[in-house]
Structure formats: C-alpha cells, structure tokens
Amino acid sequence: MDELAQLNSFRSEVPAQEDLRAEEERLMAGMSAPARSGFRRLALRATLAGGLAAAVAAAVFIVQSPPASVPPPPLIRTVAAVEVLSREAEHAGSRPELHPRPGQFLVYESQSMETSGGDAGIWLARSKRTIWLPVEGSAVKGVLQEEILAPLPYPGRTLPPAARAEQELVGKPGRPERAADFDDRAEFLRNDYAYVSKLPTDTEGMRKHPYT
Amino acid sequence: MFAEIFRRHAPEIKRFVVRRLGLDVAEDVVAETFLTAFRQRGRYDLVRHNALPWLYGIATNLIGRHKRTEASQLNLLARTGVDPVTEPFTSRSDERLSAQAVQQRLAAALAALPAGHRDVLLLVTWGGLSYTEAAEALGIRVGTVRSRVNRARAKIREELGGTDPTALVIEEVRHG
C-alpha cells in the first residue's frame, strides 16, 4: 500500500456526516441576518487575511540606488560578505526602528542584478521585487510582485538579441501574487516579526530558549 | 438555490472538516464555511461551476485558524496511539491495533508538514480534488499544487519508511 492509499485510509472511520441541523440553522440565521453583523465582519476578516486591507508599514531596503532613465554601466567588483553585512548594519542603524503590529505588513523592496544567458550570449538581467510580509503569521500569507528592469550589457560586450525578451517586459510589472511558495518550513519554525521580536536578545536567554 | 448547495455538499465538507479537526470544532467551521460562501456567492457563478472546490477552499482557510488544535491532536496520536478525532466513531472492540503504528507515524508526518503542504495534500487525497481544482480552491498555481503534493508525499514516505512491522523489528535488532 503506497503512502497515498495509507493516507486515504487514515481516519477513514469518520462516517458520512448526515446530521447537519445545527449548521443549517446557523446558516439560515446568518442568511437572514442584517449584512453588517459581527459574524459577517469575522467572515470578511478571514477572507481578507493576507490581503492588503491592513495598514502597511514600510521597511525599504534598496540594494542599488534607483537607476536614472539611462542606467550607467555597472561597476562590478567582488565584495566580501563582511563588508555587505557591515554596510547593512550601518544603514539599519541610521533609520528609525520599526515597531510593526500584528495585522500590519512589512514591505521589502529589493533590486537585483545577475548574469543571464548562455549559448545565446551573456548579459545582466535585472529585476525589482516587492514583497509584503505579514507581521504575524506565515509568509505564505504574503504578497509578491516582480518587475523586470531593462537588461544591461555585460561589461565589455554588447547586449545580445536574446536579451530582447526581457527588454519587452520592461515597464510591465507582474501581477501581485500570493507568496505561496514561501512554505518551506513547518509551522513551529516561525520567523515572522511578531515571533522573532519576542526572542531573547542575549546569549544566555537564547541558550535556554529551545527548552522553554 | 443556496440551500440546495448546502444540502448537496455539506455532508462531504463536514466529513472532511471532522477528519482534520474532530467533531467539536467541525460544527463552527462548517457553519462558517457556508455562511462565507453565501456572502461570496455573487463572485461565483454557481450555475456553471461545481461549487465543491470553492467550498473546500473556504473550509481549508477556516481550518487554518485551528492549526494548533489540528497539530496537538496529531501529536497526541503520534505519541500515544489514541486519536481524539476518531475516538467518538470507534467501538472499543475495533481491531485496529496492527494499523496503529502506521497511524502514529502518519500523524507525526502530517504534523511536521508545512501547513500549506498539508492543506494541498489533504484536499487531493481526502477531498478527492484534482490538482486544478485544488489550485482553484486555494488560489495558487497548479505547479505549486504539484510540487507541494510531491514534497509532502516524499516526506510521508520517508516517515513511513518501514511500514512492514517485521521489517521494523529486524531493523531494531540490527541497531540494537
């Protein structure tokens, strides 16, 4: 018996549920209730969870400053991780600390550039990415939007024809989508702000934390 | 019209919710599922579509509010072999002992899955939805459904590793 068959027989002793009088009564009551009852608000909130109705708190990390209309050729150099992290820490220190509340979203904007192509030539593909992550709860409830930016020639080369497909998408931001692929963790491994911000900030506290 | 939808689909939706959360919470979730559906009915073409995937989607979202209940019941089953969800339906004389080890491992595996993977897997197995229907129910891409089902299956397969009890004994001896 394979795992799907085993899963199908798991709890299969739960019989067909024929007695639905309680549910039907509640449904009938709800259907005839005035539209703005508390129940409706509750139901609405469930529908909108993950939507953008809540106030939005912004935390913006721009990796690269926004390009002018004709972007200058990029300066490419190898940067040690320690330098990137130091710069990030300095930058974070110069901004006011955010204290987002559950129900709000953190918005991260980033720009990236990477080499792209293959046999058809090489170029620098660039994109802008905005993700709205809920302050409390799984990142799967987040919303992600991506926008292709104009590709740049690889230093010392010309822009190959293959890069044109990207060129055509410039100025057409993708539709916002649910961040449905951000689900690589079990739910007890939380990393949302509401949870992380309550973790101990000292070594001793963190050592004890896994046992609490 | 809507009462007809309730009569036609509520028994199936309720069985699904009971299998995930148990009888106690099910009444709330089912009542709210259909109320939510009733409020959203304007956005859905009930004549042309099969309403079931849509209802399963709403129910799954509402089940998500009870993740702790679901996880603690699965964990209890994994630890003790007693399933609070099926207990009201099982007679004492039921001979399910041989299946118990498998149930405990399945419960542990389900509890350890990311919630989104568990949702998709159970819609496809217990709910009997196609990948397209599951994608429609949850508002995600079919490719995401496929990859979640594959990853969830792999994890469960791993957890069930030695479902043959004799294989388990041999392994224990070898390690012992």
Image (cartoon, coloured by chain):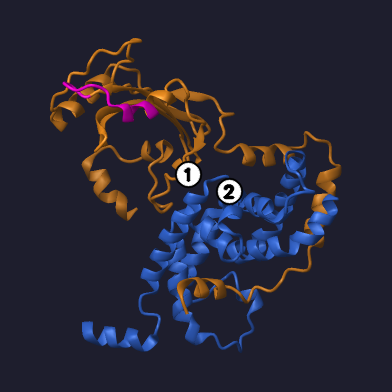
Q: Secondary structure at mark 2?
A: helix
Identify whether B132 is placed above or below B95.
above
Report whether residue A142 is seen: yes
Q: Colour in which chain A is shown? A: orange
* Location of mark 2 (residue): B138
Decide if residue B122 is on the left or right side of residue A43. left
**Circle 1 is placed at which residue position?**
A180
**Amino acid on which disc 2 is placed:** Leu
Q: Is residue A202 magenta?
A: no
Where is residue A183 drawn, in percent x and y? 43, 48
Residue B176 visible in the snapshot = no
Few, some or many residues within 10 Å of mark 1 (<14, 14–19, 20+) = many
Q: Contact, CB < 8 Å: mark 1 with mark 2?
A: yes
Q: Is residue A162 magenta?
A: yes
Q: Which chain is blue?
A: B
Q: Is residue A174 left or right of residue A95?
A: right
Separation (CA) of disc 1 from disc 2: 10 Å
